[in-house]
Image: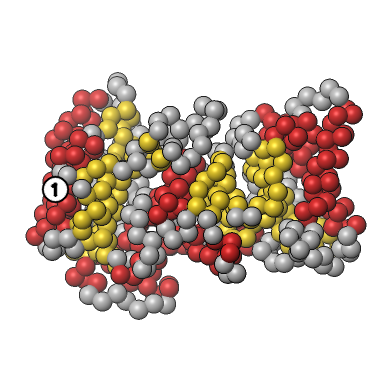
Amino acid sequence: MERFLFVLGSNFRMSIAELDNYLKHSQNKGKIIDYSANIAIVEFEKLRQDKQYINKLMKIQFVLGGCQKIAEIYDFIDIKTIQEAFPLHISKFKSVEKSRDKVIRILDNLIIGKDGIFPKIYESMFFAVSIYPNLYDEKYYSDVLIKHLLPFLNKEIMEILKRKGAIKVLYYQYPEKNIKLGNLNPIFPHHIIKYELLKENRAEIIFGFTEEGVYIARTFTTDDPNFKRKIDEERPFKEYKSAISPKLAKIMLNFLNLFMNRETKKILDPFIGNGTIGLFAILHDFQIYGVDIDAKKVKNTLRNIYWLIELLEEELPPLLDKKVLNYDARNLSNVFEPFFFDGICTEPDLGPFYKKKPYYTQVKELIEMKLEPLYDKFFREAYQILKPKCRLCFISPIINTIDGNDIHVNIEKLAIKNNFIVVPLIDLTRINNKSNQKLKFRKKYVKTLIDAKKGQITKRILYVLEKK
Ligand SMILES: C[S@@+](CC[C@H](N)C(=O)[O-])C[C@H]1O[C@@H](n2cnc3c(N)ncnc32)[C@H](O)[C@@H]1O
């Protein structure tokens, strides 16, 4: 089968948008055929035909910002069967037993075998069951999947392995306290590394739920959160209140649609700050250029880049101090040739960092007097220095006020004025929408996505613009 299960990042809409765009435009073509708030099921056109497909999966994992793990799918049980075996309220014991036997038979066929989760039996084996529900806040997850399905799977898989010849079988035991409370998180990527679950005789077995049923899969690659965190937190200069997350930086870079020969692609961050986007661009092989109006920020970014290059044990990009400049993003065409860049990726000035919600009139003034004119002039310049049909990935603020609603800048108007089109981030002609309101995409073409933490006053909206 060409089907793989992708465990999504915490912002599942953003993760799905990034993944769909990748599957549409990269060399690894495919489609999302099903999804929930935690997983996406991907059918590739021909990835599995390649003998080295696991290496390809590892590369895909490294490129994507919104993907925690990738697992290969071995089987699927429809939702009716699973709900008969594990109902919310048991009324007919006989039918429950019959349906559970059916699930055991399915497991029996897929745990061991040439095309099974474990290709052969080993003397000593270890497994971890991870259940990803359709939505974490469903009663079915807390009351049934954690309390009944998880122990059932642990017991049955252990028995199957022992019956087929394994001498010592252990499984990952989740904290009893979380099981009782019904608020369990499946094991994190760093556990996979710690428990060596990518080894042949050890495995993470994922049971990923959607509205349609449960996909049974084995994890083959996982995100390395420690490395991303190291870059984000240990670099010499960082300002927590104004920097975007590594995840979002990677997602933005991917929306530039530059998946091939990245080392030849020149990209610019014209509001580079302390350089989060720049650092992740270097990590992903791009040629990075940057500008900031604040000379101190330019120095900080350069120091951060030197630090990263040393960490990666790579050679310093040539003429770096001519590529990261103290300059104004409103005059970019004075320093860069027309049609010079393959992509622009940036988080500009988003206004002040508010500790308390501001007044509506205050924000209106900020937008009209400062942000709109700044973005307008920058778009005009960006148009000149970008190659034709190339993209500008842009973050704009949405600010929550005391006395009004959320206020945002009309980016679409500015984009059209400056000859850009707003590219939809999700195209529902490629993805089957869901009926559950919490999972549904409300429009056929989703043009913006929000990145925010709970209670954040200024949220970030992601836009992808394309030069006409
Ligand atoms: C929100 S911060 C960017 C933070 C950056 N993404 C990071 O991770 O560090 C915006 C940056 O835009 C810079 N800036 C503001 N106005 C500018 C202008 N007209 N031209 C260039 N840079 C400008 C500020 O100095 C600031 O460093």
Can residue 222 be seen in the rendering of this structure?
yes
Point 67% across, 45% down: residue: 215
Which residue reaches farthest left? 334
Point 21% across, 25% down: residue: 361
The foreground one among 232 and 346 is 346
Compared to residue 294, the image places residue 11 above or below, namely: above
In this figure, which residue is indicated by the disc labeled 1?
380
Task: Indicate left or right for 439 with 133 as reference.
Answer: left
The foreground one among 437 and 75 is 75
Can residue 394 be seen in the rendering of this structure?
no
Compared to residue 348, the image places residue 123 above or below, namely: below
Name the amino acid type tagged 1.
Arg
Q: Quadrant of residue 270?
A: bottom left
Q: How far across and down, in percent of the image, does residue 122 sit?
A: 82, 67
Pick the quarter of the image with the N terminus. bottom right
Point 54% across, 54% down: residue: 44
Task: Indicate left or right for 224 with 193 as reference.
Answer: left
The foreground one among 425 and 349 is 425
Q: How far across and down, in percent of the image, does residue 199 sit?
A: 69, 66
Rendered image coloring scheme: secondary structure
Task: Indicate left or right for 338 with 210 as reference.
Answer: left
Q: How far across and down, in percent of the image, does residue 91 sit?
A: 84, 22
Total numbered labels: 1
Point 17% across, 30% down: residue: 365
- For disc 1, the neighbor class at 10 Å (few under 14, some 14 to 19, many from 20) is many
Q: Quadrant of residue 166?
A: bottom right
Q: How far across and down, in percent of the image, does residue 96 sit?
A: 84, 31
Mark 1 residue CB less than 8 A from any atom of ligand 1: no
Question: What kind of element bears circle 1?
Answer: helix
